[in-house]
Image (cartoon, rainbow, N blue to C red):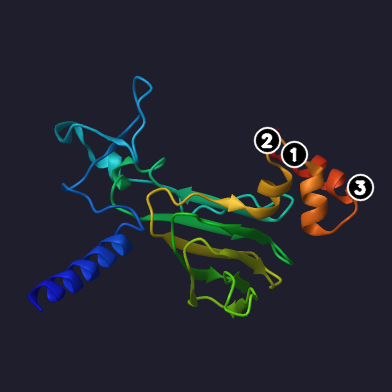
């Protein structure tokens, strides 16, 4: 019986450990300010700066209050504030982004963050937001959406495809916090049609059930955009 209890406790702890390791690992010191990799050695994260050489600049970013240019083809602009901008975020498991949207349809297109859950708050404007679930028991991918106004908050679970669309007549601004120092981003259309080298068109024509001319057009469009 004691052996069975031990086994049950061991299994529970093992499961808890696996869940805990699903996001950025916890730091083992007060901070680990990132420095650039040297000698071709790469680690899961960043090397640490000597704590004696750390300054306030390692934990600081300025200018997130400044509106960004939204004249891109999709009408949005994402300003990331992650470990690349603030070295002090290394090992802390959090980052930030400002998203500016043009009026009348500015879009942060469908994308995923492979390493982070995102929580977004609307600062200005009105956004239609949503995410798509992974396959449910019946095989469906459910779309969950909401229209957000200033002060509203919405969560996008880690790894799921999600988007934000400005449905208002004015500029919109949102701030997003992400549960990783380096959440990563995969913009679906860019990744599928703008991969370098390109995905074999036969794969895409069959996957999307469209004519080869459609795939050729989209690959030309997105490959050119991604590689300029």
Residue name at image x 62 percent, y 77 percent? 142
Residue at numbered disc 3: 213
Question: Mark number for residue 107?
Answer: none
Residue at numbered disc 1: 223
Relative to 181, does residue 132 appear above or below in the rendering? below
CB-based contact (under 8 Å), mark 3 and mark 1: no
Query: x and y percent of residue 6 in the render?
Result: 13, 71
Counting other residues with Cα less than 10 Å from the Cα at mark 2, is it few (<14), some (14-19), or many (20 or more)? few
Counting other residues with Cα less than 10 Å from the Cα at mark 3, is it few (<14), some (14-19), or many (20 or more)? few
Residue name at image x 60 percent, y 72 percent? 130
CB-based contact (under 8 Å), mark 1 and mark 2: yes
Chain-order first, disc 1 or disc 2: 2
SS under mark 1: helix
Query: x and y percent of residue 221 in the render?
Result: 80, 43
Question: Mark number for residue 196?
Answer: 2
In the visual, does 143 lie left or right of 42? right
Cα separation between marks 1 and 2: 7 Å
Residue name at image x 75 percent, y 44 percent? 222
Residue 148 falls in image quadrant: bottom right
Counting other residues with Cα less than 10 Å from the Cα at mark 1, is it few (<14), some (14-19), or many (20 or more)? many
Q: Report the front residue among 96 and 184.
A: 184
Cα separation between marks 3 and 1: 15 Å
Say if residue 125 shows up in the picture: no
């Amino acid at each position: 019986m004691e052996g069975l209890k031990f086994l049950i406790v061991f299994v529970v702890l093992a499961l808890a450990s696996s869940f805990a390791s699903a996001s950025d690992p916890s730091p083992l010191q007060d901070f680990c300010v990132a420095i650039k990799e040297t000698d071709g050695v790469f680690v899961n994260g960043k090397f640490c700066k000597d704590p004696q050489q750390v300054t306030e600049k390692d934990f600081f970013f300025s200018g997130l209050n400044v509106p960004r240019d939204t004249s891109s083809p999709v009408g949005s602009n994402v300003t990331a504030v992650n470990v690349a901008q603030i070295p002090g975020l290394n090992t802390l498991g959090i980052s930030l982004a400002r998203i500016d949207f043009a009026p009348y349809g500015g879009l942060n297109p469908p994308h995923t963050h492979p390493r982070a859950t995102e929580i977004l708050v609307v600062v200005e404007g009105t956004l239609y937001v949503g995410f798509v679930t992974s396959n449910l028991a019946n095989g469906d991918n459910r779309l969950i959406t909401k229209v957000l106004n200033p002060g509203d908050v919405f969560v996008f679970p880690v790894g799921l495809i999600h988007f934000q669309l400005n449905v208002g007549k004015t500029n919109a601004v949102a701030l997003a916090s992400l549960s990783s120092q380096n959440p990563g981003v995969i913009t679906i259309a860019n990744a599928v049609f703008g991969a370098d080298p390109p995905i074999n068109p036969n794969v895409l024509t069959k996957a999307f059930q469209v004519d080869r001319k459609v795939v050729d057009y989209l690959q030309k469009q997105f490959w050119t955009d991604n590689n300029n």
